Image: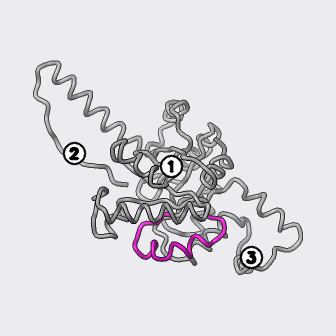
Amino acid sequence: MTPVELKEALHNGGPVFGTLIVSPSPFWPKVLGDSGLDFVFIDTEHIALDRSQVSWMCRTYKAMGLPPLVRIVSPSPYEATMVLDDGAAGVVAPYIEQVEQVQQLRGASKLRPLKGQRLDDALAGQPLPGELADYAPGFNRDNLLIINIESVPAVENLDRILDVPGIDSVLIGPHDLSSNLGVPEQYDDPTFLKTAETIFTKARAKGVGAGIHAWGDIASQARFVDMGANLLIHKADIIFFKNGIRTELAEIRESLGLKTGDGPGGDVNI
């Protein structure tokens, strides 16, 4: 899938499926090439990856037809421009609550290479001069802008946020959203589910993609798609490793007549 095809699916169809890639191992692309993914999600907000690691990951996965969506550390337009320069197909901006934040990110992702007063004028609605009016859209044609909706203020401002041109999808961060709602990690709580459905419904009504990063069972993830999500980030490589190693080691111990230790468990929240 190309970035343009992913963008088209988010606005007009889907669903599309990805996973979080924690490991920067160069062996990983070989494994993921025929795994059925539409895109990969790379998170620099919560995971210690340096710029050179992120860049080779982005360029490798993009060349494989797996557009890399990179969550930046903060909703900074400078960080957004940086990861796009490093090969990201799309920017995921964390913890957005205000229209002004989205406008700045729009400038960084959809109006590059404009900066300074020229960018401020364009964001204020002034027409671009000369050939720039055609150049900027073409230069940024492949770039996706995805914003995390993770709080009550974000939901309250969602109608205004969605009126900003250039948003390709919203994305729920369930850990942060559930915590902000006062029901941390309670992903079956009616308040959380109702809020998620509201976000999905409003985004899709505006022709904007609607997504969630989920790590529950298959039924719970399918439920989000049924509620209107058309972008699903399914768990993470580290979760697949954890689940696989625990399951198979337990089976080996059982086959040898050894006691299976319960050990510490719990979800991986990212």
> Is 15 placed above or below 195 here?
above
Q: Amino acid at mark 3?
A: Ala
Q: Residue at x 20, y 29 (%)?
A: 250
Q: Residue at x 57, y 78 (%)?
A: 100
Cβ atoms under marks 2 and 1 closer than 8 Å: no
Q: Position of residue 156 (x, y in %)?
A: 45, 76
The disc label shown at residue 122, or none: 3
Q: Residue at x 60, y 46 (%)?
A: 67
Callout 3 crowding tier (Cα within 10 Å): few <14, some 14–19, many ≥20: some
Viewer-closest of 241 and 97: 97
Q: Which residue is mark 1?
A: 41
Q: Amino acid at mark 2?
A: Gly
Report the Cα–Cα distance between label 3 and label 1.
Answer: 30 Å
Q: Position of residue 203 (x, y in %)?
A: 54, 63
Q: Residue at x 67, y 70 (%)?
A: 107
The disc label shown at residue 265, or none: 2
Q: How many marks?
A: 3
> Is 54 placed above or below 139 here?
above
Secondary element at image label 2: loop
Sequence-wise first label, 3 or 1: 1
- Does 38 lie within the magenta span? no
